[in-house]
Image: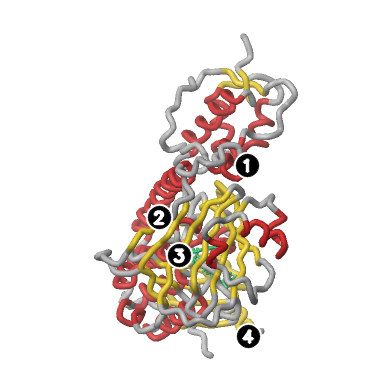
Amino acid sequence: MKLPSRACALVVGGGPAGCAVALGLARAGASSVVVERSAGRRFQIGETLRPSVGQVLTRLGLEDAFSTQRHLTSHAIASSWGSEALEVDNRLFDPAGPGWHLDRARFDAWLRREAAQAGALVIDDAKLRACARRAGGWDVVLTCADQERSMRVDVLVDATGASASVARRQGARRLVYDRMVGWSRVFDDDAPVQEGFLLVEATEDGWWYSVPLPTGGLLVVFVTGPDDRGAATTAGWTARLAGTIHTRDRVPGVGAAPPRPWAISSARLDRCVGPDWLAVGDAASVYDPLAAIGVEKALRTGADAAEAIVAGPAARADYLAGVERDFESYLSLRCAYYCAESRWPSAPFWRRRRQIDPTRATVRLSPHAMLGLSPGDPVALPPEVETILSPREWTRLRDVIASGAVAAHACAAALRPHADARHGDRRIVVALERMLDHGTLRCPSP
Ligand SMILES: Cc1cc2nc3c(=O)[nH]c(=O)nc-3n(C[C@H](O)[C@H](O)[C@H](O)COP(=O)(O)OP(=O)(O)OC[C@H]3O[C@@H](n4cnc5c(N)ncnc54)[C@H](O)[C@@H]3O)c2cc1C
């Protein structure tokens, strides 16, 4: 394989986001090299596509080719959320068409082939080894099949998924709003599946989703807090399954390997655009799988980023604003979903997630209110604040007010360099106010 000496973009990561960037660039006549470190050898989770995915597939010129790929169509989502009753959202008459259940490894490999056919150079088993910024671009060193190759590129694209390893190397930080774990098992099922439906069910310790795979078998995932270690064992997972009402009836009960963990977060980079680099897909922002929109978002941000690269540096500010805006809408929607489940008001999983929506909460706190730590130097954040203030920000806040009372505006200013640049102040002020309400902070008398 011969590497060109120069390309418009180096895309690190050959998942949906990276392939969409390469496809978008190729369709605009711009060159790109995509490096993918594993190339489909691993089972990849993230299999349900909503009908709305058709729009971005069309935008990337993939709609016809996708329809020949024989993934499973999905005409319904059944959910037990907020009550024991099973509600079925039937998509039979959805004008956008059906949703899909993917064989993800095959889908990703197909996207890489489409990107290559469109003109991108797609290299499997390759990694970015080093990069150095030069005027108007980058000198990069790639490791391809144990050999080092060098080239020059105008733009670096981080499509490495939630690790965001390229962007973090450039100094970007991940703002994590929530962490959970999905414990998955695939159950064999000999019956051929023609079409499937997604079943979502809330329980006291978390929620379940199950979906038939085009490769055969049923994928069953228990999403819970990172502290629920019991779900890691087959016995613990099975005991939790027994607590479901609908999911357990669907599981054949044979032929599954032990539970496998998947890190789940709601997170985004503090900036997903920098000098001659952009982050796309999960590298830019990660959504809860409850939204079942991660693949669609990866394709869309990939297509948006390709347009921004072609249009030049000024367009990248619009790309950045779009990612941030979408993430704020997602946080509000997610909050509404978790608040819609009220059956277990004191269960830690639900208390932790029935969070405040900092973009909508009313702020009453005066910027001049003096704040101090409550007696006993409280270490734990109130649960509803854990999702809006990161542990690092809480440590910083405690350092700031450890030696005496500090005005609310000064607390916000001290956290600002550690926070999300655009929504930082509002989020921080809401967190301060809730900590006052909860008694973690107090207003010392003058
Ligand atoms: C439990 C769970 C369930 C989910 N369910 C759904 C769902 O039903 N529907 C949905 O739409 N989404 C779902 N998602 C989310 C979805 O999987 C992701 O949003 C989507 O895969 C993001 O695509 P991406 O291209 O940004 O990243 P990825 O798919 O993670 O692709 C990143 C690629 O980069 C490669 N890579 C990483 N680092 C390097 C490196 N240094 N060098 C070279 N290559 C590298 C990786 O091998 C990988 O192929 C789910 C996620 C989880 C955790």
Q: Earlier in the sequence, mark 1 or mark 3?
A: 3
The image quarter containing residue 170 is bottom right
How packed mark 3 is, by other alpha carbons closer than 10 Å (few <14, some 14-19, many 20 or more), is some
- Residue type, numbered disc 1: Pro
Q: Position of residue 64 (x, y in %)?
A: 30, 80
Residue placed most toward the observer, 411 or 288: 288
Q: Earlier in the sequence, mark 4 or mark 3?
A: 4
How packed mark 4 is, by other alpha carbons closer than 10 Å (few <14, some 14-19, many 20 or more), is few
The residue positioned farthest toward the bottom in the image shown? 1
Residue assigned mark 3: 198
Asked if the beta carbon under badge 3 is closer than 8 A to the nearest atom of ligand 1, the reply is yes
Q: Earlier in the sequence, mark 2 or mark 4?
A: 2
The residue positioned farthest toward the right in the image shown? 376
Which residue appears at 62% of the width and 71% of the height? 253
Give the secondary structure at mark 3.
strand
Q: Earlier in the sequence, mark 4 or mark 1?
A: 4
Q: Quadrant of the C terminus?
A: top right
Residue assigned mark 2: 87
- Residue type, numbered disc 2: Glu
Asked if the beta carbon under badge 4 is closer than 8 A to the nearest atom of ligand 1, the reply is no
Q: Position of residue 303 (x, y in %)?
A: 37, 67
4 vs 3, front mark: 3
Residue assigned mark 1: 348
2 vs 1, front mark: 2
Residue 243, disc: none
Residue assigned mark 4: 145
